[in-house]
Amino acid sequence: MSAVPAPASPIARGTLYLVPAPLDFGCELQAPLQDSLPQGTLQVAARLSHWICENAKSTRAYLKRVDELIPLLQPVQALQLQELPREVHKKGDHQGNFDARPLLAAALAGHDIGLVSEAGMPAVADPGSSVVRAAHDLGLTVVPLVGPVSLLLALAASGLNGQQFAFVGYLPQDATERGQRIRELESLALKTGQTQLFIETPYRNAAMLQTLLQALQHNTRLAICSGLTLAGAQCHSHTVKLWRQQGATLDKNTPAVFALGR
C-alpha cells in the first residue's frame, strides 16, 4: 500500500513594510541617510526585492543610496518595482476609490513588499493608504518602519498645540480661494485651539507666505519649518505681526510645512 502524501503546507504570506524615505527629495543637497533613518529601517530596505512606489526612477535612486551603506540582496536593476497609477498621484487614494489588491500579489505568494513614497512616511501626506488598506483586507501583516515624518517634526518644533491638531493637506491654488480657506482654518484654530497643519508645492512657497500674512490676524501664531532633517533646516514660530515686521521670505526649492494656531 502506497503512503498517502502529506498535504502541501500553505505558503506563508509576505509582510507589507512601510519604508520611510529621506526628506531631501527634490532638494539641491542631500543629507546622509543614516542621519534620519535608523539601521533597522535600512536593513529591511536592503533585503526587500519587491516594491510599490510613486516613481520607479526615484525609488531606484533611493535604494542606491541604501546600497552604499548596506549592500542590497539583489542588484537595483533586478528589483521588482510597481508604480502607483498616475490618477493616484493626481487625486490621492485616501478616499477608498482605488483597489490596490492586485499590487499585493507578490505578498500573497510569500514575498515581503516595501511601500515607499518620494519623501517621508508613505500614506501620510502622500499616496499609499489604498495599499495599506488592501493589505489589511487581504490579511497581510503591515509593519511601519521608523523614519522622518515632516508633519510631526514641524508640529513638535512649532510650539503650537500638539495635543489637538489636524493636517488639511494642500490649500487651493487660486489666491482668493486660498485666502478664504486660510481664514476658515484660522477661525477653527482660534475657536478650538486645534493646530492646523498644511503643505505646499515648494515653488509656491512665496505665494503661500504672502497670502498667509495678508489673510491672518496679527496675533495668530504662524510656524514654518523648511528643509527638515537637512543641514540648512529652519523652524520659526512667531505671531503674524512679527512675521510682517521681519519681512520673511521663503525659497522656491525647499519643502516646507506650515502650521497656525494660538
Image: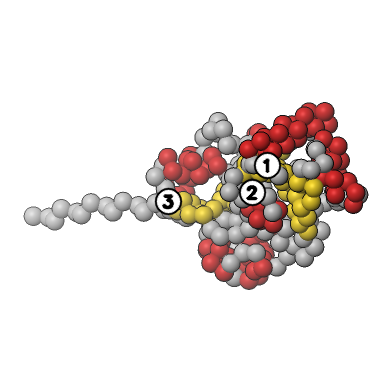
Tell me which amino acid carries mark 1.
Answer: Gln
The first of marks 2 and 3 along the sequence is 3
Q: Which residue is mark 2?
A: 161
- Circle 3 Cα neighbour tier, 10 Å, few/some/many (<14 / 14–19 / ≥20): some
Question: Who's the residue at 51% across and 54% down the image?
Answer: 144
Q: Is residue 8 visible?
A: yes
Question: Who's the residue at 63% across and 41% down the image?
Answer: 194
- Above or below, comparing residue 226 to residue 200 in the picture: below
Q: Position of residue 174 (x, y in %)?
A: 81, 30
Q: CA distance from mark 2 to mark 1?
A: 9 Å
- Above or below, comparing residue 173 to residue 65 in the picture: above
Tell me which amino acid carries mark 3.
Answer: Thr
Q: Is residue 170 left or right of residue 5?
A: right
Q: CA distance from mark 1 to mark 3?
A: 32 Å
Residue placed most toward the observer, 259 or 51: 259
User: Element under label 1?
Assistant: strand
